[in-house]
Amino acid sequence: MHADWDSTACRNEAAERVSAPVIEWVGELDGSLRLLDQTLLPCETKSIECRTVEQVVEAIRSLRVRGAPAIGVAAAYGVVVGLREFMMADRSQLNERLNEVLQLLAESRPTAVNLFWALDRQRRIAERSTSAASVDVVKALLAEARAIERDDRAMCMAIGRHGAELLNDGDTILTHCNAGGLATAGDGTALAVIYAAIAAGKTIRVFADETRPLLQGSRLTAWELSQRGVPVTVICDSMAATVMRQRRVQAVIVGADRIAANGDTANKIGTYSVACLARTHGLPFYVAAPSSTFDLSLASGEQIPIEERSPSEITHGFGRQTAPDGVAAYNPAFDVTPAELISAIITERGVIKPVTVAAIQAMLASHP
Ligand code: MRU
């Protein structure tokens, strides 16, 4: 049995320390979008080059780039990619193509609101320059995509700073899915809090839920934390109750894909179970997310669209059949954790605690 395990171990550079950018714009106006292909981690660190909007949509849909803020940044650059051939076209043709590109990107994944937030920013840029030549509009859109990337990096840093104060020296933190550098343009959201606490001199350890069915916890979070020298222990999702009962963890921190006006939070499937377990065991349950993840147009989590993915991710995960032929499988990619289970939401503007409609409104109205 051990021989089998050895033969499937990572045998290349990904097992060592590497620093390929998660998202990178290469070149100038007619450049391309380079993405670290996260479907290959932890064994391979290979980037893909997107030169068409269809390639960007495919990369988002198949989770080569994933995590709410990173999806937003990739989509913002995707708009520019989609207009490459239209820089010399007249404005009406450019406008028509822009609508098409925005539509294609908006249909890539439904839950992370950062995608729609980034596309709205791009739409507003184009609307503002009605009389400009097409090439100047594309220039402005590239500048805005770079600004979205920069803003995201800054938001991660501020989330880390605010959240680090909630952690105690010696804490072990449970996290679910990947809300780290791989999911953003910066250091992440949930993991930024951990990195900042460590930078402030605290000793912090992490338990990472493996996060069925696509294993973002074991493939991505464990990889990212190991790369940065943070002690991490992977557990199956079903072990979270036991590690809490055994007092091996002191708090839970997760990211978010969309937060409704009342604080209900959509995040990777399984997050809600972890929140229930944290409540049962008297542990704080924190959500870390930038203001771009809030959707105040939705009164509660009931209205958040939840992506349903192919049953084959459950029955044939990673190329091996693990359920009988033809059996039904239900595969929602996200769930909603009710606000009352959330101890605090850590944003780049500060910590929202308790999580109420009024506290959320006040925080989001404040300046960063
Ligand atoms: O399906 P994924 O991998 O895109 O899901 C990602 C998550 O659920 C993250 O926790 C969330 O997007 C926050 S990332 C800072």
Image (cartoon, helix red, strand yellow):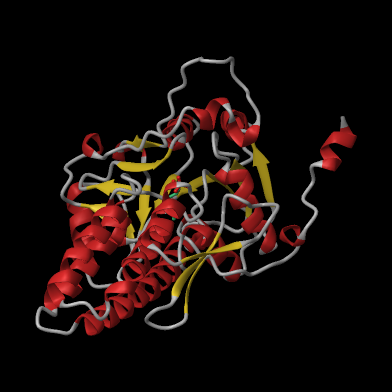
On the image, the x and y values in percent for residue 226 come to: 69, 57
258 up-or-down from 15: above or below: above
Residue at (31%, 36%) from the top-left corner?
338
Quarter where residue 228 is shown: bottom right
- Tally of marks: 0
On the image, the x and y values in percent for residue 345 come to: 35, 52
Left or right position of 128 against 144: left
152 up-or-down from 174: above or below: below
Residue at (47%, 21%) from the top-left corner?
329
In front of the other: 68 or 160: 68
Residue projecting furthest to the right? 3
Left or right position of 341 against 215: left
Left or right position of 275 against 198: left
In front of the other: 344 or 13: 13
Residue 289, visible in the rendered structure: yes
Q: Quadrant of the N terminus?
A: top right
In front of the other: 224 or 55: 55
Residue at (19%, 67%) from the top-left corner?
123
On the image, the x and y values in percent for residue 122 come to: 24, 69
Residue projecting furthest to the left? 131
In front of the other: 271 or 51: 51
On the image, the x and y values in percent for residue 253 come to: 48, 49
Residue 206, visible in the rendered structure: no
Quarter where residue 315 is shown: top right
Q: Quadrant of the C terminus?
A: bottom left
